[in-house]
Image: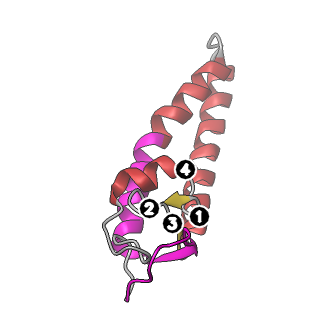
Amino acid sequence: MTNGKQCPACGKDIGIWAIFAAGMPSRIRCPHCRARLRYDGGSIVMGIALGVVVIVVLVAHEVAVDIGMTRPGLFAAVLLLITWVPIELLLAVYLRDHRSLKILDRPPGTPKVS
């Protein structure tokens, strides 16, 4: 049975960094065997989180414009970066604990783990 921590191709733990560095839960590569992996339902979870963060940042940008802040675009960009990094880290932990990994593409010569 697959879980969200072990690579279904080689059976080794992929760690949080592989998920975090991928950016999207459908672009993960196993750091051990280089198999392409994805989480079931991971794109939906990531899309909802990104949508909420973008809406909050847009509202903050409009407030910054209304109060006369200089460079509200820069403020919004920094706010997006500051809020998205910890949220993506939390999403990586959530995906590891609550979703299962599937193989998209197995590298040649990699034996199947049962």
Dot placed on the residue nearer the N-terminal end, 2 or 3: 2
SS at mark 1?
Answer: loop
Image-based side of 100 in relation to 11, left or right: right
Amino acid type for the residue under numbered disc 2: Cys
Disc number placed over residue 23 in the picture, else none: 4
Q: CA distance from mark 1 to mark 2?
A: 12 Å
Residue 44, compared with residue 8, is above or below; it is above
Amino acid type for the residue under numbered disc 4: Gly
- Mark 2–mark 4 CB contact (< 8 Å): no
Disc number placed over residue 40 in the picture, else none: none
**Magenta run includes residue 76:** no
Residue extent of the magenta highlight: 85-114
For the point 50% across and 42% down, the residue is 84
Which residue is label 2 attached to? 30
Mark 2: give few (<14), some (14-19) or many (20+) Cα within 10 Å. Answer: many
**Magenta run includes residue 104:** yes
Image-based side of 41 in relation to 113, left or right: right
SS at mark 4?
Answer: loop
Residue 28, compared with residue 21, is above or below; it is below
Disc number placed over residue 35 in the picture, else none: 3
The answer to which of 41 and 38 lies nearer the viewer is 38
Give the foreground label among 3 and 1: 3
Q: CA distance from mark 3 to mark 1?
A: 12 Å
